[in-house]
Image: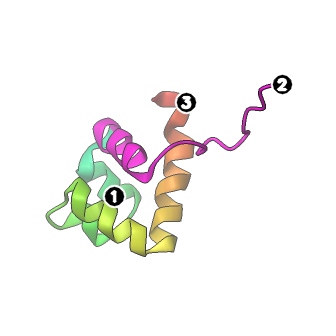
């Protein structure tokens, strides 16, 4: 049986890992400019951002899209 690799760039990547890498690369200031959501602008933290992103699909999609665009730079 051949080992099939997923073509999905998000396969196996948790939301926390995505957010950690984006915060490390951009910082919350730049993330707040790129994705205008309150959890990145007003008193940001990874924990509060994860809570919001897990409940809010449109915001999570924006983070996933930014992560995919940023992936070659990471």
Magenta span contains residue 12? yes
x and y percentages locating residue 2 in the rendered image: 83, 25
Q: Residue at x 39, y 43 (%)?
A: 17
x and y percentages locating residue 13 in the rendered image: 50, 43
Which circle marks residue 53 in the picture? none
Q: Mark 1 to mark 2: distance in Å?
A: 44 Å
x and y percentages locating residue 29 in the rendered image: 24, 52
Rendering quarter of residue 72 = top right
SS for tag 2?
A: loop
Please name whichever residue, 63 or 35, is drawn nearer the observer in this view of the structure.
63
Q: Is label 1 or label 3 in front?
A: 3
Mark 1 nearby-residue class (10 Å; few <14, some 14–19, many ≥20): few
Vertical order, 48 against 64 (above or below): below
Q: Mark 1 to mark 3: distance in Å?
A: 20 Å
Q: Kindly identify which residue carries mark 3.
A: 72
Q: Kindly identify which residue carries mark 2.
A: 2
Please name whichever residue, 38 or 46, is drawn nearer the observer in this view of the structure.
46
- Name which of mark 1 and mark 3 comes first in the sequence: 1
Q: Kindly identify which residue carries mark 1.
A: 33
Q: Is label 3 or label 2 in front?
A: 2
């Amino acid at each position: 049986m051949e080992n099939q690799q997923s073509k999905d760039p998000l396969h196996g990547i948790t939301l926390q890992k995505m957010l950690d890498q984006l915060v490390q690369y951009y910082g919350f200031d730049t993330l707040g400019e790129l994705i205008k959501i309150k959890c990145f602008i007003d008193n940001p933290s990874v924990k509060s951002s994860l809570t919001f992103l897990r409940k809010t699909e449109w915001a999570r999609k924006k983070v996933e899209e930014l992560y995919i665009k940023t992936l070659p730079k990471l």
